[in-house]
Image (tube, rainbow, N blue to C red):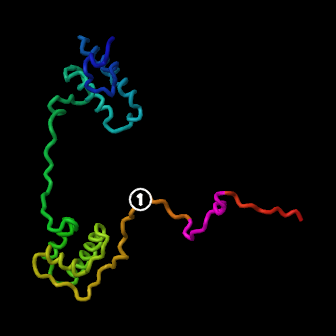
């Protein structure tokens, strides 16, 4: 018996072993022009396996790159696109540098702390007060989103002073949203809606599930 586990490993299994066999036959063609014509035929066969991608941008380019991979980057033909190298496909991507910021109060998020630090650059005017009010409203909503219990406004003002790092004047008489004004998370997302809010029993369930008896009027 000839098992697939005993055969040559396929570089791109999505094209199947028959296409890989066609690519292997290309390597045995000595004439370069004939080899190029045969490669175009293989490209058409590969494209027919994914007809829904024919109109995708650079789809033909990907097919030629896949042909190079299936040939082990040793196929010498005239290609309409630059042939990829083994190093370009196996090279590890560059490391993405993430900004490492230490947040004092993580439940408010880093953007909230940046917004409060931005207040230091503003003079003491109405714009700074408006930004402070917006930050306080947002902080209380963020606090209540993770803590279902009520929170005092003074707790929010104290956290603002902690993130600000200096003395900041809180507008007198500032009132933040109440607890009931903030949308809360549902306790059970699988809870079925109550389609009978008045609590009336469905018809036919009052007598042990039996259908109600109606007297016929023969008059």
Task: Look at the image and tell me in which quarter the N terminus lies.
Answer: top left
Residue 218 position by quadrant:
bottom right
Residue extending farthest to the front is 208
Give the x, y percent position of residue 69.
Answer: 23, 26
Q: Eyeballing the image, is 163 above or below 73?
A: below
Give the x, y percent position of residue 136.
Answer: 24, 76
In reply to whether residue 192 is colored magenta, the answer given is no
Residue 149 position by quadrant:
bottom left
Q: Eyeballing the image, is 66 above or below 184?
A: above
Name the one closer to the observer, 186 or 5: 186
Q: Eyeballing the image, is 76 above or below 134?
A: above
Give the x, y percent position of residue 139.
Answer: 25, 72
Q: Residue at x 38, y 35 (%)?
A: 53
Left or right: 99, with 175 as reference point: left
- Magenta stretch? 196-209
Q: Eyeballing the image, is 134 above or below 3?
A: below
Residue at numbered disc 1 = 189
Task: Look at the image and tell me in which quarter the C terminus lies.
Answer: bottom right
Name the one closer to the observer, 150 or 35: 150
Asked whether the viewer can see residue 121, the reply is no
Q: Main secondary structure of the magenta part?
A: loop
Left or right: 93, with 177 as reference point: left
Name the one closer to the observer, 68 or 105: 105
Residue 195 position by quadrant:
bottom right
Name the one closer to the observer, 215 or 164: 215
């Amino acid at each position: 018996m000839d098992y697939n586990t005993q055969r040559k490993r396929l570089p791109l299994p999505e094209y199947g072993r028959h296409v890989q066999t066609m690519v292997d036959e290309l390597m045995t063609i000595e004439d370069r022009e004939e080899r190029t014509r045969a490669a175009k035929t293989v490209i058409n066969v590969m494209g027919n396996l994914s007809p829904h991608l024919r109109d995708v941008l650079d789809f033909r380019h990907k097919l030629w790159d896949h042909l190079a991979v299936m040939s082990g980057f040793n196929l010498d033909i005239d290609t309409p696109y630059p042939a990829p190298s083994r190093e370009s496909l196996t090279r590890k991507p560059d490391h993405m540098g993430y900004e490492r910021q230490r947040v004092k109060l993580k439940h408010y998020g880093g953007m909230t702390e940046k917004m409060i630090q931005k207040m230091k650059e503003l003079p003491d005017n109405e714009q700074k007060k408006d930004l402070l009010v917006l930050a306080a409203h947002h902080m209380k909503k963020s606090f209540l989103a993770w803590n279902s219990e009520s929170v005092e406004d003074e707790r929010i003002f104290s956290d603002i002073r902690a993130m600000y790092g200096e003395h900041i004047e809180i507008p007198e008489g500032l009132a933040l949203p109440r607890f009931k004004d903030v949308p809360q998370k549902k306790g059970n997302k699988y809870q079925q809606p109550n389609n009978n809010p008045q609590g009336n029993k469905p018809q036919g369930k009052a007598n042990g599930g039996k259908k109600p008896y109606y007297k016929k009027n023969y008059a």
